[in-house]
Amino acid sequence: MAIITISHDSFSHGQEIADKVAQRLGYECIGPEVIQEACEAFNLPQKALKRALHDSPRVLERFLSKKERYIAMFRAAFFERMRHDNVVYHGLAGHVFLAGVPHVFKVRIITHLDDRVREEMRREGITDPGEARRLIERRDAERKGWTRYLYDRDNHDPELYDIYLNLQGIGVDQAVEIIVNAMKISTNGHMPVMRKMLADRALEAKVEARLLEIFPDVQVQVREGEVFARINASIVQEDMVARKARGAVSDIEGVKAVRVGVAPSNYVPF
């Protein structure tokens, strides 16, 4: 079992490379369809989920919208897919969600902006290079802002990846060859640890999504089915908050125990 994440900017051949790597290795190739799977699993409107995942963060948005809950639902669907054997993922934030998980090979693909402009013009039928450039730069800023807002990381940070490939010096097929060959020597034999971590993170996201329906500020960690939830709420209602939180998540499959800590807040949910 192994996972390859291919992070890339728009119109930089990331999906093409992911498809070819998956074909060479006999892996499943997964991308934006995880959004549809999250919508089906949680009965979400696809348009709303896409906005939560792609729009630039706004000041205080986490307190004014369902953005955090939608992202938790996406993460739940994402980790369920990653639990499958042998995956190449080229969708949103795989390198961030899977940080620290063993047996994951994280790749970053970059290419020159002018090449991306030409590719967008070709694919989208845009005739004005300036318009294509503006669209790309806006999309890049949104992606960068999203990663910075949620994880305080720059998605171009080389430390997030195992290998960084610049297509200026190599072609798509050469990039595929490099990834396939690197994958053959990158396996590290930590399959049981990987499976446990993916199961815990999938459960973590499900619990977080459920709790965010009730409380506006929640942090969740899961270790082998044991849930540790930190909730910002009124400290005078600590017992009530804890009971309500445990009751909300106890029926989620895989939850073995729930421990709730309440941090002081002016928020009163009842």
Image (cartoon, grey):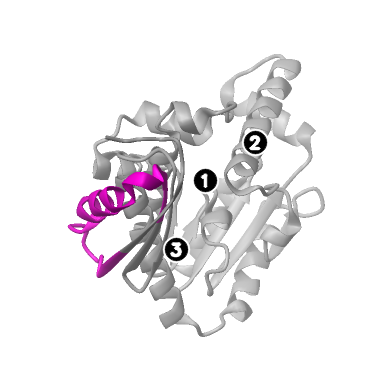
Label 3 Cα neighbours within 10 Å, binned few <14 / some 14-19 / many ≥20: many
Amino acid beneath label 1: Leu
Q: Name the foreground residue: 64 vs 83.
A: 64
| Extent of the magenta region | 230-258
Amino acid beneath label 3: Val
Amino acid beneath label 2: Gly
In the rendered image, residue 218, in percent from the top left (x then y), is placed at 42, 47
Query: Pointer 3: what residue?
Result: 87
Residue 178 falls left or right of residue 26: right
Query: Pointer 2: what residue?
Result: 145
Q: Nearer the observer, disc 3 or disc 1?
A: 1
Local secondary structure at mark 1: loop
Residue 266 falls left or right of residue 119: left
Decide: is 38 above or below 162.
above
* Residue drawn at (75%, 35%) of the image: 115
* Residue drawn at (54%, 57%) of the image: 20
Give the alpha-carbon distance from disc 2 to disc 1, as whole Å. 13 Å
In the rendered image, residue 228, in percent from the top left (x then y), is placed at 38, 63
* Lower position in the chain sequence, tag 2 or tag 3: 3
Q: Name the foreground residue: 207 vs 32.
A: 207
Q: Name the foreground residue: 258 vs 116.
A: 258
Query: Pointer 1: what residue?
Result: 92
Give the alpha-carbon distance from disc 2 to disc 3, as whole Å. 27 Å
* Residue drawn at (70%, 47%) of the image: 154
The C terminus sits in image quarter: top left
Q: Nearer the observer, disc 2 or disc 3?
A: 2
* Lower position in the chain sequence, tag 2 or tag 1: 1
